[in-house]
Amino acid sequence: MRKLVVLFVSILLSANFFTLYAKNEEEYPFITRTFPSSSIREVEVVTTGGNISMTGDAGSKAVVEVYVSCNNCSIEKIKQILKESYTIDIKVEKGKLYAAAKQKKDLFNWNQQGVGISFKIVVPKQVNSNLQTSGGNIQICNLSGSQNFKTSGGSLTIGNVSGNIVGLTSGGNITVAASSDNINLKTSGGSISANDCRGKIELKTSGGNLNLSNIEGNISAATSGGSITASNIKGTLQTGASGGNVQLNDLSGNVEASTSGGNMSVRMRSAGDYVRLSNSGDLRLTLPAGKGYKLTVKASNIETSGMKNFQGDMDRRSMEGVVGNGGTEVDLKSSEQVHLLFE
């Protein structure tokens, strides 16, 4: 069997090794390379200042495209910057596709021209990956395997990905859709949107909103500086906000939610073993009527509607007892009002 040829591309060796077009980086790749799809089981991509896009749509050939952008630069200027400041490597070795754009050593102020080197990659669906950029966006879709990706200043977009998914951005938004299994996504400065996902899901942002819909599984979602909105959630949801409102609709299963600086509204479609809610503002909980509950409620004022067959102790500030024959544990705490409705 012929030994797989390792392709090494270096801007150092020749500025004529690829074709340059007088177009922006979104239109034409500066480099295009193909490899047999069957030779690739793992992908590693590293770039500084550019985007990374990877899809699992390859047929018999995997494709790597390199795009270069530069603010107000001529083609000749781009050639010069790349020759003087970068080395680009693209190769396949022992089942790993490696694509990297790196600055040369001992260079200072190397990116004054705003150069961005981006990769668009098409690989087989079943691959593991490790992707990293210090200043761009990362987008992955139609993949299955273990995906690890990180950017210091861009957004993350994940679509139709299954397996072990771990993503981190220090300053961008995160969007994940139609994905499953183990999902762990974090941002230090953006919002998170998750739709049509299944599995064990952990979402965390230090400075943005959380928006969840059509999620099923074991879900942990938290924000330190935004609001939380969720709808059609099945399974176990643990969520919290340090400074925003929480609005949860059509929940089925268990929920534990808190907020330190806002109001909370929760509507249960069907309750599981427990519903535990706490906040510093008004709290409104709607439960299905005709079911059994074990209630513990503390607030500055408690109002109920539609509650039947309650047995226990209740006054304006506290309630402890059971509805019907008991059942789901309902624990509510608020420094303001609690509105407990049965519909």
Image (cartoon, grey):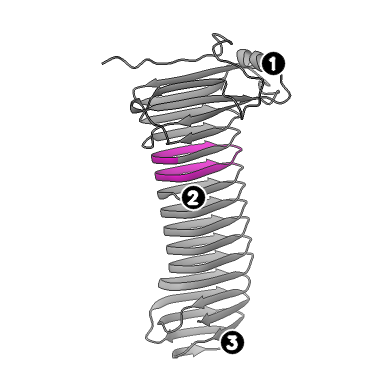
Find residue 174 and name its label.
none
> Is residue 164 a member of the stretch shown in magenta?
yes
The magenta stretch spans which residues?
Answer: 142-170
Where is residue 42 shown, x and y percent of the image?
38, 30
Residue at image mark 3? 316
Lower sequence index among marks 3 and 2: 2
Task: Tell me where residue 266 appears, x and y as whole percent.
Answer: 54, 71
Observer-nearest residue: 170 or 72? 72
Question: What's the residue type where badge 1 is placed?
Answer: Lys
Looking at the picture, which amino acid does disc 2 mark? Ala
Q: Which residue is mark 1?
A: 77
What secondary structure prevails in the magenta region? strand
Please name the residue shown 51% across and 53% down the image. 194
In terms of sequence position, does the residue under pointer 2 or pointer 1 come before the other? Answer: 1
What SS does tag 1 mark?
helix
Mark 2 touching mark 1, by CB under 8 A?
no
Q: Secondary structure at mark 2?
A: strand
Q: CA distance from mark 1 to mark 3?
A: 75 Å
- First along the sequence among labels 1 and 3: 1
Q: Residues within 10 Å of mark 1 (few under 14, many from 20)?
A: few
Tell me which residue sits at (53%, 68%) in the image: 249
